[in-house]
Image (cartoon, rainbow, N blue to C red):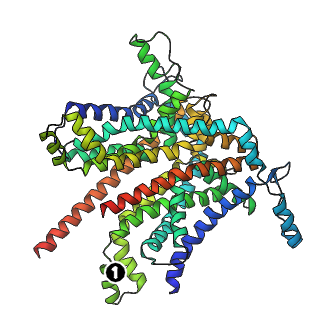
């Protein structure tokens, strides 16, 4: 569809992207505000960033969040990739419908229900709430996202490549490591990144499954936000927005490069 | 069937079974229990040491009292209705805002489109909580919006938006907009422009060509986008608790407060069971729509 890029389309795009980005731009600008009053500009200052890094409660929460995110996204990537493999390559097995339901349901489940049900599970099996329970909870809901991302790549994967490796004497594990994994790697990496950001961002499920000594960053942000806007939170948000933007741009550059390399390979193969 | 395949299927299967399905069974069970001043705060507790007799007593003590309570207390059904209303209105607004953006993207020069796509996806990767939070500074009484409007002389008194349902609508539209734009964009991008040209050659005005050709062909994207906004909006907790006020009743918030403030686990579980029952219909409709789309694509 490529015709008549009219003033109407230009206006729609300008207004639309202004709506999407203006709130975050304003937030970033006011994080450099001298005044404690977040809505009155009183000159440029980076003092709130200093305050933030001296705030031990925030640093502790950030550490808990990072630990949970790294552990849960790694575990979720392994389990999610296995689940995708089982769904795409597993053939028929008893309870397949239930399995696919269990993979898709957490994607649409309200967080309050997931959080409540996991908390009740942890209590009934007598597990002490803390970093471990948050990690288990995050692994469970993020592995479904990983599995969806990886299976969309597996579906388009040419199986004869794997069969060729097996015919040439690879063990199944070698075939997976040398042929399948490099091909699905971009999907596995984006699955890990998705799981990582979802875990980093989650408030509701963490609130249900956290113990008294394991406050995560979103929980800390939420409790201070309830008291109103604070310049420290603006500074923290700016750091997080900056990190995510850098990560997304890097990821898209890497995938662009890998597409360009694949095209170059194909051209070389066509010439040969 | 070799052991490798069994291990591959069984590991994620058992994980989801234990951490997804079993917890639901527990929620159902507690929804049928009664509130009690004990730890954990509900009764009956399953006591397997008493054998068969204990099991019979346990099941005899379960009942639907909590559901009857939910039906009687106006707080709960108004919260359910109000969630449905807020989700419906915000889905409609998101569609009105998102459609022109998706349309503009599909009509933009081809070399712009990957960048535009990334600009739509980027907010989705940014913290949900922060995106909701960013509106406090804009909507509050001394916020950016009121200051700008007063400076322009458009209003004399600050508008009361923060802590009302209006702020909740803005928050939902803002945070879920990418979910509406992406499916509509992918439907519009596939559209064969010669169809619109044909309609115009046959005497349609541009507007009627849009209504008779473009819009009907983008309908699968519109339906998918609406479900992707409507379903999570019903159970939303973060937006009503940060931007909403006392008048804002939403069931996700009610459940959270019932559990953490009132510590009434059986009622909170019953609220969750009913919420799930409400969500099942749109979820099934959504899955059907996706299925139809996949079949149509093949």
Report the residue that reaches farthest toward the front: B202
Element marked by disc 1:
helix
Q: Please, is residue A180 above or below residue A146 in the view?
A: below
Disc 1 crowd rating (10 Å Cα; few below 14, some 14-19, many 20+) is: some
Between B125 and B252, the one nearer to me in the picture:
B252
The residue drawn where x is 33% and y is 49% is A249
Q: Position of residue B225 (x, y in %)?
A: 40, 46
Q: Is residue B223 left or right of residue A196?
A: left
Between A24 and A164, the one nearer to me in the picture:
A164
Between A148 and B143, the one nearer to me in the picture:
A148
Q: Is residue A17 left or right of residue B142?
A: left
Quadrant (top left, top right, bottom left, bottom right) of the C terminus of chain B: bottom left
Q: Is residue B110 visible?
A: yes
Q: Identify the residue position indicated by label 1 in the image.
A: A162
Q: Position of residue B101 (x, y in %)?
A: 31, 38
Q: Please, is residue B13 above or below residue B214 in the view?
A: below
The residue drawn where x is 36% and y is 69% is A155
Q: Is residue A212 visible?
A: no
Between B73 and B155, the one nearer to me in the picture:
B73
Q: Please, is residue B27 above or below residue B103 in the view?
A: below
Q: Position of residue B291 (x, y in %)?
A: 40, 60
Q: Please, is residue A212 above or below residue B165 in the view?
A: below
Q: Is residue B163 left or right of residue A10?
A: right
Chain for numbered disc 1: A
Q: Position of residue B134 (x, y in %)?
A: 48, 33
The residue drawn where x is 54% and y is 36% is B85
């Amino acid at each position: 569809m490529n015709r008549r890029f009219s003033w109407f389309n230009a206006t729609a795009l300008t207004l639309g992207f202004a709506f999407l980005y203006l709130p975050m731009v304003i937030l970033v600008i006011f994080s450099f505000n001298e005044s404690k009053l977040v809505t009155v500009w009183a000159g440029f200052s980076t003092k709130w960033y200093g305050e933030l890094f001296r705030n031990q409660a925030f640093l502790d929460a950030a550490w808990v969040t990072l630990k949970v995110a790294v552990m849960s996204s790694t575990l979720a990537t392994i389990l999610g990739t296995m689940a995708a493999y089982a769904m795409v390559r597993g053939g028929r097995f008893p309870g397949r419908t239930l399995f696919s339901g269990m993979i898709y349901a957490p994607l649409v489940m309200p967080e309050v229900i997931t959080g409540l049900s996991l908390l009740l599970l942890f209590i009934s099996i007598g597990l002490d709430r803390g970093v471990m329970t948050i990690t288990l909870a995050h692994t469970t809901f993020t592995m479904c996202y990983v599995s969806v991302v990886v299976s969309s790549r597996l579906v388009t994967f040419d199986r004869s490549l794997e069969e060729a490796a097996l015919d040439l004497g690879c063990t199944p594990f070698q075939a997976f490591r040398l042929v399948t994994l490099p091909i699905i790697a971009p999907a596995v990496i984006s699955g890990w990144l998705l799981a990582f950001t979802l875990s980093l961002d989650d408030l509701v499920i963490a609130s249900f499954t956290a113990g008294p000594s394991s406050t995560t960053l979103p929980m800390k942000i939420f409790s201070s936000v309830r008291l109103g806007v604070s310049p420290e939170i603006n500074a923290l948000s700016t750091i997080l927005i900056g990190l995510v933007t850098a990560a997304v741009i890097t990821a898209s550059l890497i995938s662009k490069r890998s597409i360009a390399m694949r095209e170059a390979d194909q051209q070389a193969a066509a010439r040969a | 069937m070799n052991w490798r395949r069994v291990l591959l299927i069984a590991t994620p299967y058992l994980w989801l079974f234990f951490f997804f399905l079993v917890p639901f069974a527990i929620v159902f069970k507690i929804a049928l229990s009664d509130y009690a001043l004990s730890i954990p705060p509900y009764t009956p507790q399953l006591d397997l040491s008493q054998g068969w007799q204990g099991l019979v007593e346990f099941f005899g003590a379960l009942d639907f009292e909590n559901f009857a309570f939910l039906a009687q207390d106006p707080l709960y059904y108004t919260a359910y209705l109000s969630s449905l209303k807020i989700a419906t209105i915000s889905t409609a607004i998101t569609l009105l805002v998102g459609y022109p953006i998706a349309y503009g993207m599909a009509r933009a020069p081809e070399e712009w489109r990957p960048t535009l796509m990334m600009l739509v996806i980027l907010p989705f990767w940014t913290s949900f909580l922060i995106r909701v939070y960013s509106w406090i500074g804009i909507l509050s009484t001394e916020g950016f919006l009121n200051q700008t409007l007063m400076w322009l002389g458009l209003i004399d008194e600050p508008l009361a938006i923060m802590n009302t349902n209006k702020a909740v609508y803005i928050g939902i539209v803002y945070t879920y907009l990418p979910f509406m734009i992406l499916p509509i964009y992918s439907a519009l991008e596939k559209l064969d422009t010669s169809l619109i040209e044909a309609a115009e050659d046959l005497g349609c005005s541009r507007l009627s060509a849009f209504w008779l050709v473009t819009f009907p062909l983008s309908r699968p994207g519109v339906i998918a986008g609406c479900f992707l906004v409507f379903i999570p909006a019903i159970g939303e907790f973060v937006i009503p608790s940060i931007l909403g006020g006392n008048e804002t009743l939403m069931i996700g918030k009610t459940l959270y407060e019932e559990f953490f403030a009132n510590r009434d686990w059986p009622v909170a579980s019953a609220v969750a069971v009913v919420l799930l029952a409400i969500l099942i219909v749109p979820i099934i409709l959504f899955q059907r729509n996706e299925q139809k789309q996949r079949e149509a694509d093949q």
